[in-house]
Structure formats: structure tokens, C-alpha cells
């Protein structure tokens, strides 16, 4: 997919690189100097282009808005005509300049203000994890993908951004219409507070738990040392359709410290029926299985468990 990014800073580069690695065609724009823009495109790599905001908006099937709030509405207003009909992924936090709070909220949101500035665009609000997480080797925090709430009035545009959120390695949560950005944006502010004021650091994220009938599936493999890398490569590809399934609430693949031939895959399903009846009948299962099929003979145990105790 062609992705135009407006804002060549930490988020623009972080999202751009993760999308480029997945094979998306990335064009980056909007820095204060040409040199900064070229450097940012170089940091994204994978053939990413440095272009003007106009070109990024015109060429991108999805346009990612990653600008400081202070300049955001002006930039969007100038590009409004070009953004008509585009999916506009808004990543901004409407932070006060001293980061002490949000400039607006509760009765409106940055996402809605952006939609007013570009009324023909399909604005989708999805505040990504911290740039430090995006730019690190792994998106996992305590073994889980950080959650990203995705709001927008157009269901197809929302689905597109949910897919891109999965591609960057986060866990997209469909949070309904754009007006819900009034409630999701303050969560971004809470994370800023936790990270910088409460001293938790930027490796923090939100996770949504839902559903009463969550079922755990455990699959234990014994994989010899010579095929461990091939096994991990297969799972790197297999988890993409897995994470995209609406029935999968999350997964982790752990390798045993004492016996490195042992791997345990844990998948949290919305229910056992959803896993066995709906996921197994889906295209996502076929794609998942095409990657891991060769390792099925190495499975030692594959069963569902109900959580009896947890912290
Ligand atoms: N950083 C995070 O962890 C994080 C997480 C979630 C959401 N967000 C939100 O994402 C958006 C982007 O954040 P960021 O951290 O990527 O910001 P950033 O690193 O400061 O990047 C801002 C980009 O906009 C460019 N820019 C062009 N004209 C500008 C002007 N007149 N004033 C200021 N910047 C100008 C900057 O150019 P130069 O490169 O030349 O400076 C830079 O490329 C913000 O709304 C932020 O609140 C950030």
C-alpha cells in the first residue's frame, strides 16, 4: 500500500520504518530543513522517498499525520483538497507546549478538529505507542502488543488503519466513531504522564481485556537447534494473520530457558468455539497454517485451558 507521511519526526520515522519493513511503499514529508527530511527518509530506509506534503497526500492511499499539534490544523487545512477521499491516520496528541496537559478534550477531540479542517478526508484517530517503542527492536511490552484504539466514522477506513496498526506490531482495537477520540486521546495523555511524570519510562502501553469466555490455548513444540531459526521465521509470518483474526485476543511464543528445544505458544481466543469453528474456517487460519504446517509433527501438546488463578 502507498503510505504518505506528513511529519518526518520520531513518529513519522518510527511508523514509516515499520510499515516499510512490511512492504508498504513509504513517502515521507514535512521537516524544517531538506537535510532533516532526507535524513529521516534514510532512517526509514527500504526505498522511502522524501517528498513534499502535497505529494505525500496526493500519492498516498493512506496519509499518516504525525505533526506537532501546534502546526497540525494549518497543515491539514492547506492540504484539505488533496486529502479529499483519502484515509487520514491521525497520530497526534493535542499537547500543550509544556506537555502539562491537553489543549482540548471531552467535548471535542484533535481527531474531530482535523476532520473539520479536511472535511472530505476519512479521518481515523489512532495514537500509536511511544516513538521509543516504535523505534526499538521489539514492539512487545511484557510479551504483549501494546493496544491502539482506532476511531473513525468510515468503517472501511477504520479497517484499513486497524490493519496498518497490526503491521507496525501493535494491537488495534476498533473503538467506533471518531467522536470516541474524545475519550481515547486522554488515554494518550495518561501514558505521557505515566512515562515522564510518574517515571515509568516510555515502555508502557494500554491493553484492553474483554469477554468472559476467554480461552487459552497452549501448544508445546520440541524443535531441534538446527531448525529453531526456521521455526521462528515461520512464526514471524504466521502471527500476522493470527493477530489479524477477530477471534485472537493475543499470543506469545516463549522459549524454555532450561531446555531451549522447548517452545510454548500461548494464544488467547475469544472462546473455544470461536477458535475451533470460526477461526479454523477462516482465510486467516489457512494463511497461518501454511506457515506453521511443517512444524506440526513436532507438537508435543496442544490443548485449551481455563484460567484458574491469575494476578
Ligand atoms: N513521540 C511520541 O512518542 C508520540 C507518541 C504518540 C503520539 N505522538 C504525537 O505524534 C505527533 C508527532 O510527534 P513526534 O514525536 O514525531 O514529533 P517530532 O519528533 O517533533 O516531529 C515533528 C516533525 O514535524 C516537523 N515540522 C515541520 N515544520 C515544523 C514546525 N513548524 N514546527 C515543528 N515541527 C515541524 C519536524 O521537523 P524537523 O525534523 O525539522 O524538526 C519533524 O519532522 C505529535 O502530535 C505527538 O504528540 C507522539
Image (cartoon, rainbow, N blue to C red):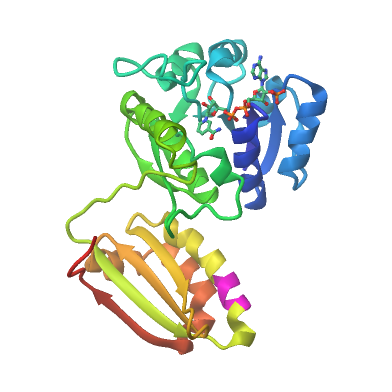
Residue at image coords 47%, 89%: 297
Does residue 92 lie above or below 157 as drawn?
A: above
Residue 270 image point, x, y percent: 26, 59
Residue 149 image point, x, y percent: 38, 38
Does residue 129 lie above or below 263 as drawn?
A: above
- Which residues fall within the magenta stretch? 229-234
Residue at image coords 45%, 72%: 254
Does residue 166 lie above or below 194 as drawn?
A: below
* Majority secondary structure of magenta residues: helix
Q: Point out the image quarter for the C terminus.
A: bottom left
Does residue 263 lie above or below 241 as drawn?
A: below
Residue 17 image point, x, y percent: 66, 44
Residue 210 image point, x, y percent: 24, 51
Ligand 1 located in image quadrant: top right
**Residue 211 counted in the magenta span:** no
Left or right placement of residue 118 versus residue 43 in this view: left
Amino acid at each position: 500500500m502507498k503510505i504518505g507521511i506528513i511529519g518526518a519526526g520520531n513518529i513519522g520515522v518510527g511508523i514509516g520504518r515499520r510499515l516499510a519493513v512490511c512492504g508498504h511503499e513509504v513517502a515521507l514529508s514535512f521537516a524544517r530543513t531538506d537535510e532533516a527530511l532526507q535524513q529521516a527518509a534514510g532512517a526509514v530506509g527500504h526505498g522511502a522517498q522524501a517528498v513534499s506534503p502535497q505529494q505525500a497526500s496526493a500519492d498516498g492511499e493512506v496519509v499518516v499525520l504525525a505533526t506537532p499539534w501546534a502546526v497540525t490544523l494549518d497543515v491539514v487545512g492547506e492540504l484539505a483538497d488533496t486529502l479529499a477521499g483519502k484515509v487520514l491516520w491521525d497520530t497526534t496528541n493535542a499537547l500543550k507546549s509544556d506537555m502539562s496537559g491537553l489543549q482540548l478534550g471531552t467535548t471535542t477531540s484533535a481527531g474531530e478538529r482535523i476532520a473539520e479542517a479536511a472535511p472530505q478526508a476519512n479521518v481515523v484517530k489512532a495514537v500509536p505507542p511511544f516513538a521509543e517503542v516504535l523505534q526499538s527492536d521489539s514492539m512487545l511490552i511484557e510479551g504483549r502488543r501494546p493496544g491502539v484504539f482506532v476511531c473513525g466514522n468510515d468503517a472501511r477506513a477504520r479497517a484499513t488503519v486497524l490493519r496498518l496498526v497490526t503491521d507496525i506490531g501493535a494491537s488495534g482495537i476498533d473503538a467506533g466513531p471518531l467522536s470516541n477520540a474524545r475519550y481515547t486521546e486522554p488515554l494518550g495523555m495518561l501514558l505521557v504522564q505515566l512515562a515522564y511524570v510518574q517515571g515509568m519510562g516510555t515502555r508502557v502501553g494500554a491493553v484492553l481485556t474483554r469477554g468472559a469466555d476467554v480461552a487459552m490455548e497452549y501448544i508445546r513444540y520440541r524443535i531441534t537447534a538446527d531448525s529453531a531459526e526456521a521455526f521462528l521465521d515461520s512464526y514471524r509470518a504466521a502471527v500476522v494473520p493470527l493477530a489479524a483474526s477477530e477471534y485472537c485476543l493475543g499470543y506469545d511464543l516463549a522459549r524454555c530457558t532450561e531446555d531451549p528445544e522447548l517452545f510454548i505458544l500461548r494464544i488467547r481466543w475469544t472462546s473455544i468455539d470461536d477458535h475451533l469453528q470460526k477461526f479454523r474456517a477462516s482465510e486467516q487460519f489457512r494463511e497461518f497454517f501454511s506457515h506453521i504446517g511443517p512444524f506440526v509433527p513436532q507438537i508435543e501438546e496442544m490443548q485449551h485451558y481455563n484460567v484458574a488463578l491469575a494476578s
